[in-house]
Image (tube, coloured by chain):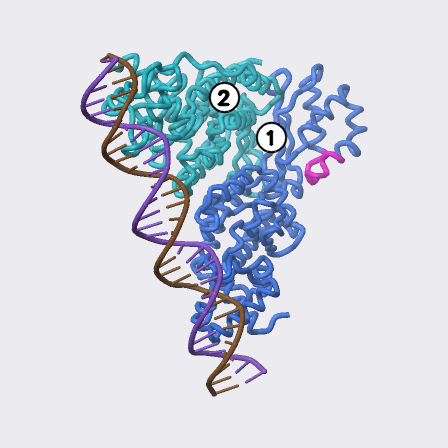
Chain colours: A blue, B cyan, C brown, D purple
DNA sequence: TTTAGCACTCGACTCCATCGAGTGCTAACG
DNA sequence: CGTTAGCACTCGATGGAGTCGAGTGCTAAA
């Protein structure tokens, strides 16, 4: 589709623009050395590239900037992953050498590392409870009509919820049910809890328990891990402010507003997990008006081969892809390795 | 210190400036009606007020703006709490009528209500675990050498931590200890757990258990609720961006950066809890460079007479004190009432 | 003591000239 | 024929001059 020379020039322009955030002129490309042509020649090619839709011109007498299509081409043809400085790779490795116990803490910490290393905003989804299984269930009375339901997963995540106890249900009764559940449901994946409750245990429970219906309602409530099944971690939100394209308060407002809408961000990240490997979404590909000038790069991490969470970097479309992509790649792989190892133990 | 007329004029100026965010001239004050003097007279008084340090002049031919001292005077002499619209009070009442079980959720929700009602940023400290007591303790093995420690308080808060189990300690041994602890420590305030563990139980435990030292280390770890004792909730951070004084990205950057530093914010809020009732800190009184142009208004809420958390509103010094103060007042009182009632049940 | 009148100040805004980076086109060059 | 030098042209950015007007301080009269 593009000649070798066009490819080189487009590459050079995107590269330059990523560095400078200013429209790139033919002269500066010519002087870079890696494209050995005169400004005039480059100008001709630039005109062609613009016609093909890879470049844009803010106004007649300015240089060119990459279009979304231009970025897309650049990313898709990015040279075999750029090498990171060894000390940076070391930083990431070291992080996993640290003794951290709580799964979610590890993910959160990974987020701050990401945002610090890249100077962009990191958005991560914590390990999905979905694919973990029940380790222990408990119902602890607090007062006459409330109790805390506690669910512990095999990964050590603890979810809790305060539930209301229907009038007439005795503590003894509840204990019986809880014992039964622990006996029968330990090891069952969290997402199967509800169906297991109804299908397999329903009858048995009905035999032991008088207030069957009320109790299932309580358990329903306890097992219903709405959006709490996964936690969202955001780090380096203010890095957005350092980007010249967002120096304007009005432009940044919408973005920061969205940062407070956890569910929306979750959906955004979750929709990525379908694809495998590193996924790059540029501008409108993110499907969010406020992010038209942003790019989102995501990767997933897994436990035992099953993808359970997502790590992502959000920055301007003029993002340093060549640097961010390998960072995400390494970090996600390390996370997977770390969790899998931990899980096996 | 000030004449009645000076007080009125100062009041009028602060009032106007809060509304308009623009330097206030003598003419506009004269036209307000509540101060029945000509611009010339008011000009004279304004000159005096400036000399006394209550007003400032951005430049010679501009109106006056209140100085920190001016705001302070204004706040300290604020007329007996302004009345809120009944429907606003109703909004807050309604919120507490809702059936919400988890304590922290209530606080978090209160934060969003605060920021929405005021259009400023709300910062709240969740109920301190410190003053709650142990309801249940549990140690749940996950793998050969790790376990989840779960602490449930009488308020239904659940804290959990993954701990490492020293080699050689058997599960049976651990269970013995946990049973003993539940038997002896239920009802003990969280902050006394550690000392209770050492002083009262040390000897008894030593009798039953062989790996005494290793086990206390584990329990130490479990009971050590570092900064997790309290949770911070921030809402409406982007409301800051709508304030004309922060239209500049450089000015806002520092503020938003600090918003990501949870521990700093915590200290900031906690230092308020010393005072009772509503506390207003203006500009430099907050003791933070980035907040020189901000004011922080805080109130505390209590459980059983003991103050356990703080709710606060951060906005520009040019904040609508007359509105924010009663809102905070009502909400904090409602929170106290709500928690106390809930606690009694 | 209060107020009307007035000269003065100074930021905000508009207009305009200048500057320069970058372009597109044409013609010359190897 | 591809490449390049040369050149006129475009257009945003920059900066200075002029104007406007809100607001002041001071003086003198009511």
Label at residue A65 = none
Location of mark 1 (residue)? A160
Horizontal side of A137 relative to A95 (left or right) equals: right
In front here: A96 or B58?
Answer: B58
Chain for disc number 2: B
Figure check: B301 above or below A138: above
Task: Give the secondary structure at mark 2.
Answer: loop
Q: Taking B113 as reference, is B300 left or right?
A: left
- Res. A102 visible in picture: no
Q: Is residue A84 above or below residue B183?
A: below
* Quarter of the view holding residue A72: bottom right
Q: Position of residue B282 (x, y in %)?
A: 35, 26
Residue B183 in picture, x, y percent from top left? 54, 22
The chain letter under disc 1 is A
Q: Is residue A186 left or right of residue B327?
A: right
The N terminus of chain B lies in which quarter of the figure?
A: top left
Q: Position of residue B184 (x, y in %)?
A: 51, 21
**Within the magenta stretch, is there residue A227?**
no
Q: Which mark is residue B133?
A: 2
In the image, the segment drawn in magenta is A184-195
Separation of marks 1 and 2 at Cα, in angstroms? 18 Å
Residue drawn at (64%, 24%) of the image: A163
């Amino acid at each position: 589709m593009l000649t070798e020379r066009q490819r080189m020039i487009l590459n050079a322009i995107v590269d330059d623009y990523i560095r400078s955030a200013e429209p790139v002129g033919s002269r500066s490309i010519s002087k870079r050395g890696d494209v050995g042509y005169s400004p005039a020649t480059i100008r001709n090619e630039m005109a062609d590239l613009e016609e093909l839709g890879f470049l844009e011109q803010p106004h007649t007498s300015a240089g060119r900037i990459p279009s979304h299509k231009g970025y897309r081409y650049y990313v898709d043809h990015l040279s075999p992953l750029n090498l990171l400085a060894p000390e940076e790779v070391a930083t990431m490795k070291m992080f996993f050498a640290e003794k951290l116990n709580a799964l979610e803490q590890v993910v959160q910490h990974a987020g701050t590392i990401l945002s610090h290393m890249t100077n962009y905003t990191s958005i991560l989804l914590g390990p999905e409870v979905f694919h973990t299984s029940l380790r222990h269930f408990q119902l602890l009375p607090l007062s006459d009509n409330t109790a805390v339901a506690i669910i512990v997963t095999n990964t050590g995540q603890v979810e809790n919820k305060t539930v209301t106890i229907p009038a007439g249900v005795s503590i003894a009764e509840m204990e019986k049910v809880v014992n039964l559940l622990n006996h029968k449901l330990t090891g069952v994946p969290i997402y199967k809890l509800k169906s297991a409750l109804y299908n397999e245990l329903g009858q048995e429970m009905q035999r032991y328990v008088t207030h069957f219906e009320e109790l299932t309602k309580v358990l329903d409530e306890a097992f219903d891990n709405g959006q709490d099944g996964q936690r969202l971690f955001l780090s380096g939100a203010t890095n957005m402010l350092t980007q010249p394209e967002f120096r304007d308060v009005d432009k940044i407002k919408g973005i920061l507003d969205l940062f407070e809408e956890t569910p929306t961000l979750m959906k955004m990240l979750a929709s990525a997990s379908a694809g495998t490997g590193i996924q790059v979404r540029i501008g409108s590909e993110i499907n969010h008006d406020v992010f038209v000038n942003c790019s989102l790069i995501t990767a997933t991490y897994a436990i035992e081969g099953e993808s359970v969470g997502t790590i992502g970097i959000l920055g301007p479309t003029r993002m340093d892809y060549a640097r961010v992509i390998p960072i995400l790649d390494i970090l996600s792989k390390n996370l997977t390795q770390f969790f899998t190892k931990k899980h096996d133990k």
